[in-house]
Structure formats: C-alpha cells, structure tokens
Image (cartoon, rainbow, N blue to C red):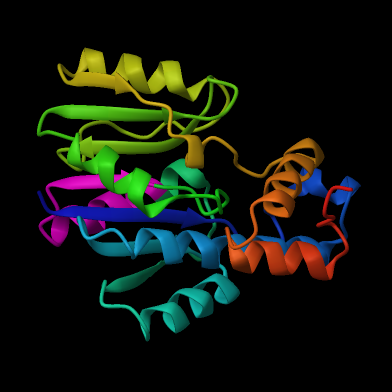
Amino acid sequence: MRTTAIIPVKRFGAAKQRLLDRVDRPQRAAIVKAMLADVLEAVTAVEAIERLILVTGEGRAERVALRHAQRVKTPIEVLRDPDDKGHNEAAVLGIIRAKSLGATAAALLPGDCPLLDATELAAALERLDTGRVTVVPDRHGTGTNALLMAPADAIGPAFGEGSAERHRDRAERAGYEVAIEPLASLGLDLDTPDDLTALAAVLATDRGRAPATAEALGSLGLLRTPA
C-alpha cells in the first residue's frame, strides 16, 4: 500500500490560543515548533510511509520541515495554505495532493502529538487494509487525533469536538470497515493548560522521549523532574 502522511499545521500565531493562560506568544510558538519537529522525526521513521505532505501557511513550520527533509530519505513536500482556512480544509488539500501522486492510503496525523511512537504507528498501518478507515481517538475518547484511510480519500475529514463518532458514521455510511483504535502515543495532544501539564509530566519521567519538545519545555522552566 502506498501511504502518504498528511500533517496540517496552523499558523503559529493562531494555534493553541488556550495555552496563553500558561505561556506567552513567543513561548507558545517555540513549543508548537518543537512538537512539529518531534512528530516529523517519528513519522519519517516509519517505512510504510512513502511520502509526507505538510499543509501550512506558517513559514516557520515550512522551514522545520525542509530542514528535516535534508537528513531523511522520506520525501517531504510542503503544500502552502496561505489563507490558513482550517484543519479540515488543509487536510482535504493534502488528500487531493496525495491522490494526485498515486497514494492508495493516507495517514492524517497531528502536529501536536510529540509523543508519537514510530513503532506504534507502523503497526497500525500494517493493520490497515484496503476498504478500511481507522479512527484514532484522543485521550478523552471523543475527538480524533489521527485518521488512517485506504483508499486515501475514503471519507472527508471532520476533525473537531466529537469527531470520532462523526468519522465512524461517515465511514460506515460510505460502506467502509471501521476500526476505533486508540494508540497510546497519539492519545495526548496539546490544546489546553491541563494538556501542557500532562505532557510535561510524561517528559519529566521518560527522558529521551520527544527530545525537541522536552528541550523547549525545559528552557521555559515547564519541565520539572518529580522529587
């Protein structure tokens, strides 16, 4: 199966507004940039992914991707989204581009799940057969943190609150097999101050994981080793 990973990334100035209760705008941008670096590292370590498409209107995200592309074998393409229309619209742009390049499967992945484990993602893609949609829920079980689809355009993405059930419904209505498959490393995305606390706790006790994000949080004094 020819799988393309698609990662939509908002402009840093518009991303993670709820984090402003804990960090200022430059700090927030530094965290978002670091998380993307860790996600790219994990995704390009998965052999089943033949190409990665980053959809963004953010120049800093583009530079992170292009620097990463210089040291990995997986082709990385940046698809510019100058209007920053939204996550679902960006995902659709990525799907259209992936299909034009011959992708038979798509992995819609977040840029804000830095704990993503390449081995876990690879195993999930091995279980993906043609005619199947895999919904990876968030840690609350209601949102969607990843969508794996074969064919690549099986359904239109509908990310947001309550999206796990929406994606299941869309796939079933379209006649596809559906799997709701929690993946531990994709459970925690960063949206709220509580998420930031949870992420910092994981990284403080699991050294070596998500190194770019850990470094960013540490430089901001947000990563404290438990006593």
Using the rendered image of the protein, determine whether residue 128 is visible from the camera's viewpoint: yes
Residue 159 in percent (x, y) is at 48, 33
Q: Residue at x 59, y 75 (%)?
A: 60
Q: Nearer the viewer, residue 67 or 171?
A: 67
Asked whether, in this view, residue 1 is left or right of residue 19, the answer is left
Q: Position of residue 144 (x, y in %)?
A: 47, 31
Is 167 placed left or right of 188 in the picture?
A: left
Identified at 33% across, 14% down, the residue is 169
Q: Which of the 4 image quarters holds residue 12? A: bottom right
Assess whether residue 94 is covered by the magenta stretch.
yes
For the residue pair 191 and 180, the one nearer the viewer reads as 180
Magenta segment: does it hold 185?
Answer: no
Q: Residue at x 79, y 43 (%)?
A: 197
Q: Which segment did they paint magenta?
A: 91-108
> Is residue 170 shown above or below 19?
above
Compared to residue 222, the image places residue 57 above or below, namely: below
Q: State the image quarter where residue 149 is shown.
A: top left
Up/down of 38 relative to 199, above or below: below
User: Residue 52 location, x and y as percent?
Assistant: 31, 63
Q: Nearer the viewer, residue 102 or 189?
A: 189
